[in-house]
Image (cartoon, rainbow, N blue to C red):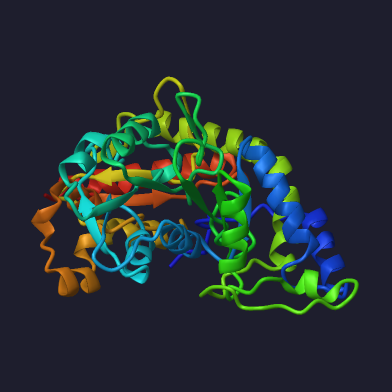
Amino acid sequence: MSEKKVEYFRHNLNDDDIALTTDVLRSVFLTTGPKVAAFELRLAEYLGHGHVVGLTSCTAALHLALLRYGIGPGDEVITTAMTFCATATAIIQAGATPILVDVCPQSALLRPEDAEKAITPKTKAIIPVHLYGRMVDMRGFAELAQRHNLIIIEDAAHCIEGQRDGIRPGQLGHAACFSFYATKNITCGEGGALVCHTEEDATWYRSARHHGISKNAASRYTGTYQHWDMEMMGWKYNMDDIQAALLVNQIDRIDTYRSRRQAIEERYRNLLANAKGITLVEPVKDLEISSHHLFTVLLHPNISRDHVLLQLQENGIGCAVNYRAVHTLKYFKETFGFKAENFPVANDIGNRTISLPLYPKLLDNEIDYIASVLCEIADEALSVI
């Protein structure tokens, strides 16, 4: 194997982020405290609406949002078959049943008209996923929810910066959930957040993220000691000040990062426009701003994806698969009896997709190298079919 030339991902933490985190490490308070509060306020200001609650993961945010609206055993929640498995497992963790729906073959996004066909008397909510950085049609989902009296919880793990038809994540849904995992557009290694509409909702989430107790550590141990009580069933989902310190100033740079990722995607699209054996996912349309979180390509059905992945790695190029369709994963097949043909579009995308490096520190000559190697590998693979 050749020496690694291009990593799949490089984070954007800078010296200021590290210095702020070091300040926290030298302080008295490490858990949920003033830095989390500052991050929550800054992210709400960036989104332009709502109340933000810092959490341990996007999965935790999805789980709590379902519980906030009383969704549990006997209920069905519709979501997409083309997403990371956590979207569906959060539904299971809440005690409800995930109902998967196939996706648009051009964009890989869940469409309101397809979700509507899956609604039954047991349906209580829909979790649309803003995949690859593009938002779904939230105006359509909001209208659908109003007609059927459903809750909409947005999985915005890929889409903190996204807009569609003038709408941001969380504006039309009942809540939107974000991820700050190691490969996300802003990151603290792990971590997540949720945006909701009212202070009452935010207060509930802040209690639920911390065992359901009435006061967090910051309020208990700063100033005069205050007794606490456990008022509801809760979980251990609270973001800490170390994570928040890493995140808070990245928000000021987030649109600069997004612009660079957009330029990288445009360069990829130009370089791969006429590539043999490679199909590109639908680009952003008018009235859309994508987060450009992932750049994925689809291989010709007769090309072995494993062969291409191996060849990319042997040429020093990091790569990934985002995602194998949820219904093809072992747990879901064994638990729900899914078959590959149940959701043919998601299955096809899941079998053919490859994610290429996409991050602000990626250089133009690295993009050119990746595209050149991929074209050569795909062309060779086609020639022996």
**321 relative position to 45: left or right:** left
Horizontal and vertical percent for residue 352?
A: 24, 51
Quarter holding the N terminus is: bottom left
| Residue drawn at the location 57% of the way across and 70% of the way down | 237
Horizontal and vertical percent for residue 112?
A: 27, 36
Query: Quarter-wise, where is residue 222 in the image?
Result: bottom right
Residue 74 in sight = yes
Horizontal and vertical percent for residue 194?
A: 55, 53
| Residue drawn at the location 69% of the way across and 39% of the way down | 45
Q: Nearer the viewer, residue 10 or 90?
A: 90
Horizontal and vertical percent for residue 156?
A: 47, 47
**36 relative position to 24: left or right:** left
Q: Nearer the viewer, residue 339 or 114?
A: 114
Q: Residue furthest right?
A: 223
Q: Residue furthest top?
A: 286
Q: Nearer the viewer, residue 263 or 53?
A: 53
Tell me how many marks there are.
0
**298 relative position to 191: left or right:** left
Query: Quarter-wise, where is residue 20 in the image?
Result: bottom right
| Residue drawn at the location 74% of the way across and 66% of the way down | 241
Q: Nearer the viewer, residue 7 or 380?
A: 7
Q: Measured along the vertical axis of the image, is residue 291 above or below residue 330? A: above
Residue 128 in sight = no
| Residue drawn at the location 34% of the way across and 29% of the way down | 273
Query: Quarter-wise, where is residue 161 in the image?
Result: top right
Q: Measured along the vertical axis of the image, is residue 140 above or below residue 372? A: above
